Amino acid sequence: MNTPQQPKRRQFFKIASAGTVASASGGLPMLFMPNAAVAEDVLGADVFKGLTKIARDIFPHDRFEDELYANAVGVYADQAKADGALKKMLQDGVAQANAAAKKKFGKDYADVATEKQRLEILKSMVKTPFFAKLRGDLVVSLYNQPAVWAKLGYQGPSADKGGYINRGFNDQDWMDKI
Amino acid sequence: MASKKFGLNDEVVVIVGSGAGGGTLGNELAQKGIDVVILEAGKRHEINDFENDEWPMFSKISWLDKRTTSGTWRVAKDFPNLPAWIVKAVGGSTVHWAGASLRFQEHEFKTRTVYGAVKGANLLDWPITLKDLEPYYARAEDKMGTTGTNGIPRLPGSNNYKVLAAGAKKMGYKRFHTGNMSINSQPRDGRGSCQQIGFCFQGCKSGAKWSTLYTEIPKGEKTGHMEVRSDAQALKIEHDASGKVTGVLYGDSKGNRYFQKAKVVCVAGNSIESPRLLLNSASSMFPNGLANSSGQVGKNYMRHMTGSVYATFEKPVHMFRGTTMAGIVQDEARFDPKRGFVGGYEMETLSLGVPFLAAFLDPGSWGRDFSTAMDAYDNMAGMWLVGEDMAQESNRITLHASEKDQFGLPIPNVQFSDHPNDVAMRNHGFKQGKALYESVGAKRVIYTPPYPSTHNLGTNRMSAKASDGVVNKWGQSHDVKNLFVSDGSQFTTGGAENPTLTIVALAIRQAEYIAQSLNNREI
């Protein structure tokens, strides 16, 4: 399988997401470059770590490395720098998750051992604007990564390879044998 | 080649919009030697600008100006500012359309008569019949190179189609094939054949798919009788003391405003912007909006009954490989109220790439229920259900009470709620789609709710009587004789079929009428 390649690819953000936050739900879509390192710097290492773990728990794929979730959270780099309210929302959200985790399991959210335990906390937060915003943004930023496409078996762009006409658009016949 | 440029004081036919309706009408008039200026709100992106990448193309070509929503439809909750998924660019939504080109069925032109008085619905017979439209359907199919017509072979079936066809056979369905697609299966009209690229919704990189962008528009421009102005958003249609329209005020992204004189104005901005323009053109003579003596402008908004069924299998499908919508089962499109609803629906192959599937599969969902579906992406097949929804007066486009756009004009609000008939039809379609896929071994079946509307119809409907609708059987305003509606907003009812072929057929027919009327000095 070919790995989709797009050297100058921009991460696209917003509008697709289901937000309950007024400011998040709609308006013009914006394009952001994902940058995990900058996001970590802007939000703080602990907050970034918490967000990355929450990202995995929202869209859990065991075969995805942590890096893919960190990249997804990385779209907040420029946004959180420019938007103090957003930065605070993300920081407060992680603080709330950590506080609940400390109370229940004696440690920060990201350090709670099992997904089942972490979900007990996350499920209590689904109605918060923080969760809606994060889920809505991540469903775009996580699944818009060519490295994710490759893992899921999506070959992506084909025009530059002559389409799929000679690359398997009709190569399956199992359905005819049922 | 540089196309003809007209002056603002030239009295031309002004067409608002360059999609299936406007682009086709413009070329048809230009071919007859009639001078036309097309005002297109969006930019001109040629094929070189197309990318095989869902979000970047979405952000490049979609109509993203703010709109609001109301009603009980789920789109209002999941995508409150994106009621419709349509294109703002030269070529309009023919840039991203899938290519499915189906004729209406005879009974779909007379639903009030055939379906009877459906409670809560505002059904009305079209003032034209299938017979009236047949010659124009034939010309549209020839123009667009529709497969399965004019001796043009159908497209080869992709893996996604093969799953659909195998299931259809098991179900005992009889009418299934790779569709009537306006996508070249062999070179035709100066365009090559389909390379099974996928990404039909992102603009066809090979140009095999018909779009006014690279067919009607350059052909019209070549005549010397047509100019397309991009970045030209129509703001208001003006009229004189006699009530005849005199031209169109438009604005560009730099904040400039212009007034283009017109002897005829044709509105083809799709079913949200077209009624919005008429409503925003209210005057002391027409206080409720232009062409609105019936009060029907903006009402009867239809979006087709839609829904998708995705299914995962043991073995690979790779649904993204190849033509997106080249596959159809038509057995459920019939009129058969024994199923518990009037009207019918088509089942058509559909695939989304990973980015769009994640966003649209089940908006708002998360956790392993969701991620395990995405994990089976390569073994997934998909179909789209598209059927006739009921015209309802309360489903409508209105002007927002307080929010304004970049030109200072009220933005549109789109109100929609399913009619019980729409719900019954969707549930039937989901059940049949599930049974079809399970008959060929589906492990898991997912019902996906309607996407933001791609088929927007009915908001300036055709009617025999002036009190029932906005335009007559030629798409001509009942109130203003040199004002026409030339897009899907003139549909009296929606039919089960993808609307583009009917929009094109109506535009060809309307061009003849306008030419004749101008010639006879009737308008």
Image (tube, coloured by chain):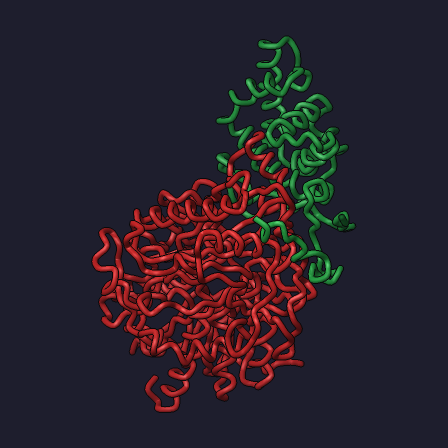
Q: Residue B78 location in percent, x, y? A: 47, 41
Residue closer to the observer: B246 or A147: A147
In which quadrant of the rendered view does residue B276 lie? bottom left
Question: Does residue B223 appear left or right of residue B171 in this picture?
Answer: right
Q: Looking at the image, which residue is at 26% across and 54% down? A: B121
Q: Tell me if residue B235 comes above or below residue B152 in the rendering.
A: above
Q: Residue A23 location in percent, x, y? A: 52, 38
Q: Residue B434 location in percent, x, y? A: 46, 44
Q: Tell me if residue B12 comes above or below residue B446 in the rendering.
A: below
In which quadrant of the rendered view does residue A112 lie? top right
Q: Looking at the image, which residue is at 52% across and 29% down? A: A129
Residue closer to the observer: A103 or B151: B151
Q: Tell me if residue A120 comes above or below residue B39 in the rendering.
A: above
Q: Looking at the image, which residue is at 61% across and 64% down? A: B156
Chain B: give its colour.
Answer: red
Q: Is residue B414 visible?
A: yes
Q: Tell me if residue A95 comes above or below residue B459 in the rendering.
A: above
Question: Does residue A42 appear left or right of residue B436 in this picture?
Answer: right
Q: Is residue B251 visible?
A: no
View extreme (right): residue? A7
Q: Residue A67 location in percent, x, y? A: 75, 32
Check the picture and name the quadrant holding the N terminus of chain B. Answer: bottom right
View extreme (bottom): residue? B520
Check the picture and name the quadrant holding the C terminus of chain B. Answer: bottom left
The chain displayed green equals A
Q: Looking at the image, which residue is at 48% across and 86% down? A: B34
